[in-house]
Image: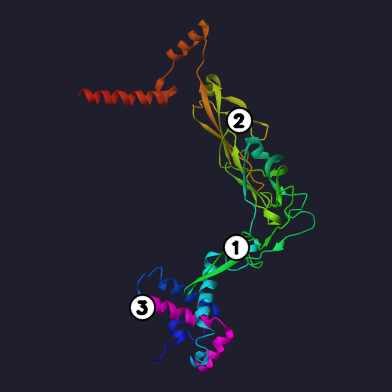
Amino acid sequence: MARDDFYDTLGVRRDADDGEIKKAYRKLAMKYHPDRNPGDAVAEQSFKDVNEAYEVLKDGEKRAAYDRFGHAAFEQGGGPGGFSGGFASGFADIFEEMFAGGGRGGGQTAGKGADLRFNMEVSLEDAYQGKQTEIRVPTSVACGSCNGSGAEGNSGPAACGTCQGHGRVRSQSGFFTVERTCPTCQGAGHVIKDPCRVCGGQGRTQKEKTLSVNIPAGVEDSTRIRLAGEGEAGLRGAPAGDLYIFLTLRSHRFFQRDGADIYCRVPISMTTAALGGTVEVPTVDGTLARITIPSGTPTGHQFRLRGKGMSVLRSKSRGDMFVQASVETPQNLTKRQKELLKEFEAESDDAKHSPEAHGFFSKVKDIWEDLKE
């Protein structure tokens, strides 16, 4: 019975490069995988055919022999390079790339230290100006006695006898080869025969570190600052994790922040609002800004001070400051002050001097008249 051409099996051209062949194989292997097609004999055979084709075409020498002699190049050896083992190897290569980061040698990253989180509260002023500060973080650091190796004295680690220093072991079930982290060395590839008495072979001890942190001007609430390598120390000399500082801005008694803009509410006297004048208001940079109040300024009117808002992160620009006027009603009036206000009221034209109130009550009157009809 004639066998299918390997290129046709993978659905690629004869001049396809290694990347195209690997991509086609990965797609078909996932499609016909027995776990996705339980009890399907046709899918199982297709799965075997796909892996047999890939085992040949992924290897430069085997592919060259196949291109020249076809299937006859492997008939004497009972399959392409010993198919029963080669198929599993090709299958492992692809799925190792998909699920284990694309390569072997798990011992290289075994025992990497954990990332740490530190919550920090900063004031609005610090967020505006930026700040250099120090924090104290309880964490794991490399053991000073064994220099992080975990071994007592100068004994050093020894290659793991279970995985022969690879950090991973393989087991075969049928035509599947499963690779997993070595249970003896936990992926490190080596073991400590004479553990350090200080750290117990861990290569790290608990300590509180003091770190300098630069808070840049313009940071916002929930800004995250990463300090690479300042997290938990790794096991027996493995890389340390990172430290992530999460910033929370403390609420201010006078200012409210919205992005790069600052908002505040400023009370002004009734006479200043009516006659006009000037007021001085504080700004986030610690200076005072003078605002001219036009005569007849109502409550809620906003004044915009350009460039008086927050710093913008990684920029020299600043946002704006918005000041909302709040006209204050006079309290604790003297008898004479009340008489003056009554005189003012008597001489006032509501439509002219209090247009908003006059318009509102006129509308209410119209609505009332409509309801009575």
Work out whether residue 237 or residue 311 is closer to the camera in this orientation and state it.
Answer: 237
- Magenta highlight on residue 145: no
Residue at the top extreme of this rendering:
335
The tag on residue 182 is: 1
Q: Amino acid at mark 3?
A: Val
Please state the horizontal and vertical placement of residue 108, each as a whole percent of the image.
66, 63
What secondary structure is found at the residue carrying circle 1?
loop
Q: Residues within 10 Å of mark 1 (few under 14, many from 20)?
A: many
Instruction: Check whether the beta carbons of the residues at disc 1 and disc 2 lie within 8 A of each other.
Output: no
Please state the horizontal and vertical placement of residue 193, each as a whole percent of the image.
71, 58
Please state the horizontal and vertical placement of residue 123, each as a whole percent of the image.
63, 35
100 vs 364: above or below: below
Q: Is residue 197 left or right of residue 268?
A: right
What secondary structure is found at the residue carrying circle 2?
strand
Q: Earlier in the sequence, mark 3 or mark 1?
A: 3
The tag on residue 42 is: 3
Residue at the right extreme of this rendering:
154
Q: Is residue 178 left or right of residue 147?
A: left
Residue at (50, 82) in percent of width and height: 83
Q: Residues within 10 Å of mark 2 (few under 14, many from 20)?
A: some
Instruction: Check whether the beta carbons of the residues at disc 3 and disc 2 lie within 8 A of each other.
Output: no
Residue at the left extreme of this rendering:
373
So how many labels did they put on this image?
Answer: 3
Q: Nearer the viewer, mark 1 or mark 2?
A: 1
Q: Which residues are magenta?
A: 41-70
Residue at (43, 83) in percent of width and height: 9
Residue bearing mark 2: 291
Q: Amino acid at mark 2?
A: Ile
Type of secondary structure dominating the magenta stretch = helix
